Image: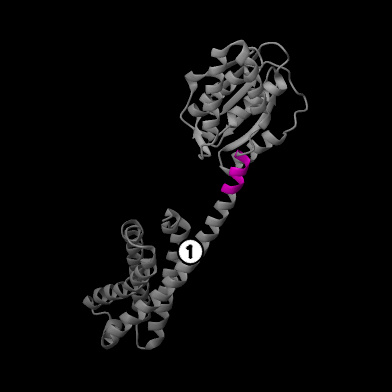
C-alpha cells in the first residue's frame, strides 16, 4: 500500500472546505425557497451550520479512516468504507443541525419535522455523491503525481548509473601492475575497489554526508595507485553536519578536481561541510570551465532531488560549491 494514496494535502482540505461551503449555500437556498414564510436569516444560519457540521464530520471520518481503518483493511474495501463515511457525514451533519435548532424552536425545524427522516437520507445521499466526485478528483491527482514521480525516479536512476567507466578501467590496470610490485598493497586496493563498488550499487539516491565522504576517501586511495600518493585529501570534519546529499556528488567533484587540477605535483583537495559543501583544490585552474556530462549530471540530480544547486567559483583555488537548500 502506498502512503500517498491515503494522503490528504492542505490543498485537498481547501477543496473539502470550499465544497462544504457551497453545499451549505445550496442547502440554505433550498430551504429558503421551499416556503416563503421562513425567516430568511434563521434559514441561512441553519443551512450554514449544517454545512459546517457536515464538514466537521467529514474531517473526522477522513482522519479516522486514513490513519486507522484503511491501512488495516484490504484495498478492495477502501471505496466502500469511504462512501459509507461520506453518507454518514451528510446524514449526521444534518441530524445534528436539526436537533440543535429544534431545541431553540426555530421555525424551519417545525416545517421540515415531518420530512426529517427523508431529508436525512437525501442530504446523506448528496454528500455521498459529492464524496464520490471528490474522491475521484483526488485519486486522479495522486495518480498523476505518482506517474510524475516514477518518471523522475527513472531519470534519476539513469543519471546515477552514468558512473565513469574510465575510473574502473584505470583502477584495474593499476592494480594489475601493482600485483607484481607490492602484493599487500594490491590486496588492499582490490578491497577498496570492492567497497567502493558495493556502495555504488546501493539504491538510495540520498545518503549521509559521512557515508559520501567515506566513499570519497576510498576513491582517492584507489586513485593514488596511479598518482603515487600525490593526491592529498583534507576533510574538515570539525564542521561536519548531519545532512543528506546525492550519492557520488562529492566524489564527482573530487574526480573533477583530479582530472582538471592535477599538474604532476602534489594536489591538495579540501572538502569543507558547513552551510554548504565546498570542494576546492590548489592545482591548475580552468578560466573557462564548462559543465561536461558529469557536472551537468550532478546539477540535474540536485534539481530533481530538490537539494540545492551547483556553482563554480574561480579565485585563489579552483572551487565547486553545492549550495544546500535552506
Q: Nearer the viewer, residue 227 or 86?
A: 227
Outermost residue toward the front? 180
Give the residue drawn at x 32%, y 81%: 121
Q: Is residue 291 left or right of residue 326?
A: right
Say if the magenta span includes residue 159.
yes
- The residue labelled by disc 1 is 139
Quarter where residue 57 is shown:
bottom left
Residue pushed farthest left?
103
The region drawn magenta spans 153-160
Horizontal side, residue 36 vs residue 233: left or right = left
On screen, residue 22 above or below 31:
above
Compared with residue 81, is residue 191 higher up or lower down, i.e. above or below? above
The image shows residue 271 at horizontal and vertical percentages of 57, 21
Percent coordinates x, y for residue 11 in the rendering:
48, 58
Residue drawn at x 66%, y 11% is 266
Main secondary-structure element of the magenta-colored stretch: helix
Q: Residue at x 29, y 73 (%)?
A: 92
Visual colour scheme:
one colour
Q: Residue at x 37, y 79 (%)?
A: 125
Q: On the picture, is 60 further left or further right than 277?
A: left
Residue 303 in the image, given as x and y percentages of width and height: 61, 42
* Image side of residue 290 versus residue 19, left or right: right
For the residue pair 80 and 109, the one nearer the viewer reads as 80
Q: Residue furthest right?
A: 288
Task: Indicate the position of residue 231 as horizontal and vertical percent values.
Answer: 63, 15
Residue 144 appears in the rendering? yes
Question: Label 1 neighbourhood size at 10 Å, few (<14), some (14-19), many (20+)?
Answer: some
Question: Magenta segment: does it hold 209?
Answer: no
Amino acid at each position: 500500500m502506498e502512503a500517498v494514496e491515503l494522503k490528504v494535502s492542505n490543498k485537498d482540505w481547501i477543496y473539502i472546505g470550499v465544497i462544504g461551503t457551497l453545499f451549505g449555500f445550496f442547502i440554505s437556498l433550498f430551504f429558503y425557497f421551499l416556503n416563503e414564510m421562513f425567516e430568511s436569516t434563521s434559514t441561512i444560519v441553519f443551512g450554514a451550520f449544517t454545512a459546517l457540521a457536515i464538514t466537521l464530520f467529514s474531517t473526522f471520518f477522513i482522519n479516522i479512516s486514513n490513519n486507522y481503518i484503511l491501512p488495516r483493511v484490504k484495498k478492495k474495501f477502501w471505496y466502500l468504507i469511504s462512501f459509507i463515511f461520506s453518507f454518514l457525514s451528510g446524514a449526521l451533519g444534518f441530524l445534528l443541525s436539526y436537533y440543535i435548532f429544534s431545541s431553540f424552536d426555530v421555525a424551519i425545524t417545525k416545517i421540515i419535522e415531518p420530512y426529517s427522516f427523508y431529508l436525512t437520507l437525501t442530504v446523506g445521499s448528496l454528500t455521498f455523491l459529492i464524496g464520490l466526485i471528490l474522491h475521484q478528483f483526488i485519486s486522479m491527482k495522486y495518480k498523476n503525481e505518482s506517474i510524475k514521480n516514477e518518471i523522475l525516479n527513472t531519470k534519476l536512476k539513469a543519471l546515477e548509473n552514468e558512473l565513469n567507466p574510465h575510473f574502473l578501467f584505470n583502477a584495474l590496470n593499476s592494480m594489475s601492475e601493482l600485483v607484481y610490485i607490492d602484493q599487500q598493497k594490491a590486496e588492499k586496493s582490490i578491497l577498496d575497489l570492492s567497497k567502493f563498488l558495493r556502495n555504488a550499487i546501493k539504491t538510495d539516491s540520498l545518503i549521509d554526508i559521512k557515508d559520501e565522504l567515506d566513499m570519497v576517501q576510498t576513491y582517492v586511495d584507489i586513485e593514488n595507485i596511479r598518482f603515487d600518493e600525490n593526491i592529498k585529501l583534507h576533510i574538515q570534519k570539525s564542521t561536519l553536519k548531519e545532512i543528506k546529499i546525492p550519492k557520488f556528488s562529492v566524489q564527482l567533484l573530487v574526480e573533477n578536481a583530479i582530472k582538471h587540477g592535477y599538474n604532476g605535483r602534489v594536489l591538495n583537495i579540501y572538502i569543507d561541510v558547513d552551510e554548504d559543501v565546498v570542494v576546492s583544490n590548489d592545482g591548475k585552474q580552468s578560466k573557462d570551465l564548462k559543465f561536461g556530462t558529469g557536472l551537468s549530471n550532478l546539477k540535474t540530480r540536485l534539481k530533481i532531488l530538490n537539494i540545492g544547486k551547483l556553482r563554480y567559483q574561480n579565485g585563489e583555488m579552483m572551487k565547486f560549491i553545492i549550495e544546500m537548500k535552506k
